[in-house]
Image: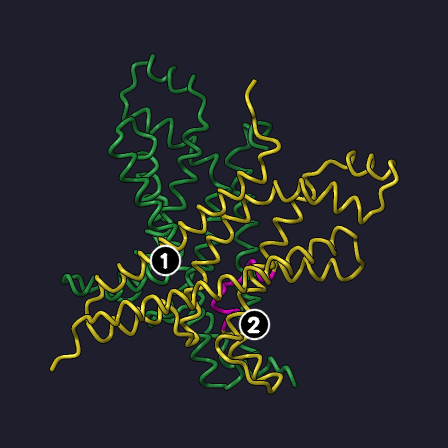
Chain colours: A yellow, B green
Amino acid sequence: MRFTDFTPFDLVLLAQGLGVNVALFLVTSLLGLVIGIGWAIVRYYHVPVLSELVAFVSELLKNSPVLVQLFLVFFGLPGLLHIRVTPVMAAAITLSANTAAFTYVIAVSAIESIGRDQIEAARVFGLSRWQVLRHVVLPQAAAFAVGPLVALLVNQLQVTSLISVIGVVDLTKIGNILNMRTLKPFIVWTAVGLLYYLASKLVAWLGSRFEKRLRAHSAWRGL
Amino acid sequence: MRLDLSVLLPHLGFLAQGAFLTAQACALALVGSVIMGAFVAIARTSSSARLQRTSLIYVDIFRNVPFIVQLFFFYYGLPEIGISIDAFTTGVIALSMAGGAYASDVIRAGILAIDQGIIEAAEVSGLSRRVIFTRIVLPIALRTSVRPLGSVLINMILTSSILSTITLNELTGSAQIVVSQTYRPFEVYVVLLVVYAILTYLVSLAIALLHRRLNRDMREAVA
């Protein structure tokens, strides 16, 4: 009996792998968005020391390879702090931090895209700083940032493929396993690539639909 | 919890070799991706609908499939069809293909930004279409897209860390070897992170200088 042929179960394996990627993508994107926006708000309020620290960390995370960040968390942290870090935990920490760094930059430029005069006018009307942030800055910044954010998320979905290197059994790892067993790299990697492609396209499509809704108020309605 | 960077001192030479290999791969891949990107940009701005569609498919695929999957596709797939090349060449080819997809967008934008009057003037002067393209359109397009091409290069430096997964001992790969010899993962990877950040920072400085130098006669146009 030969074990090198494809079996129907391989499809289940591929789907499972994709599920791991998508689940991790959803969790880390959500965490990253929240953390990144938090960092941007720290900067918005000019919190001393903290805002400089945030800018530095985000710069460092943006300008170093995700793979090295993964290695640092997965191999480095346990050695330094004497804690156990599972591959999934390391992947979640790294990807969230990475998404946060990029979200921070997008959120900062979105906030800066709103004219000072608007904020001053709102303050003159007696709105508190929190109300200005909530009712004036946030809605406009969201409409400005949604395009870059969608592009970022599509990119981050692809970055999740790197977690296979530290041993998370995701789609790429499944591809590796199937490749080793069947020795048919073209079919295996084409299938894996296709699944990633479809997932990316889905994210991009959902993003563009969401963007259209957010911008509906400023869209040209015709005469 | 202790951080002792002196354990790295004996391995600095080895790491420098890895950094040199990274630089080599990125330099070759930069040339490859600019050539690739220029051809694809030509196809995407051509009047032939079929060329436009084909080039769009290429860009779409290489931007929406994770680099590590592309890399494995080339690394495991090419030998199966009888092309046996070493890891370095495979890595450079994969980086060039992926970088080419991004570079083509940049160069395309550069081409589309060219004033139609310049092309009409060249046509009136009786220049052939090939001469117009190689002597007028491409130099202007490349010159204005130096800065975005620089971000493609920076991305490429970060992406090149993934080449360590196909047994290529570039900067990340040699760092992994140093870790296995010193058992100090945290120190090694922190240094690696900072080295990558400094590397990309220096590259971005150089790009800004080059951009200013190339566009010195049209400062107000490109700022």
Q: Would you identify the image quadrant in which residue A157 lies?
A: bottom left
Q: Main secondary structure of the magenta part?
A: helix
Percent x, y for residue A55? 68, 57
> In the image, is residue B69 above or below residue B48?
below
Question: Is B54 or B8 nearer to us in this picture?
Answer: B54
Q: Is residue A207 magenta?
A: no
Q: What residue is disc 1 on? A: A196
Residue at image coords 69%, 53%: A40
Residue at 56% over, 26% down: A220
Please state, as top left, top right, bottom left or bottom right, where the C terminus of chain A lies in the image: top right
Question: Are dots 1 and 2 on a single chain?
Answer: no
Residue B58 place in picture, x, y as percent: 30, 45
Subunit bearing disc 1: A
Left or right: B100 as drawn, with respect to A110: left
**Which segment did they paint magenta?**
A60-70
Residue under circle 2? B191
- Amino acid on which disc 1 is placed: Tyr
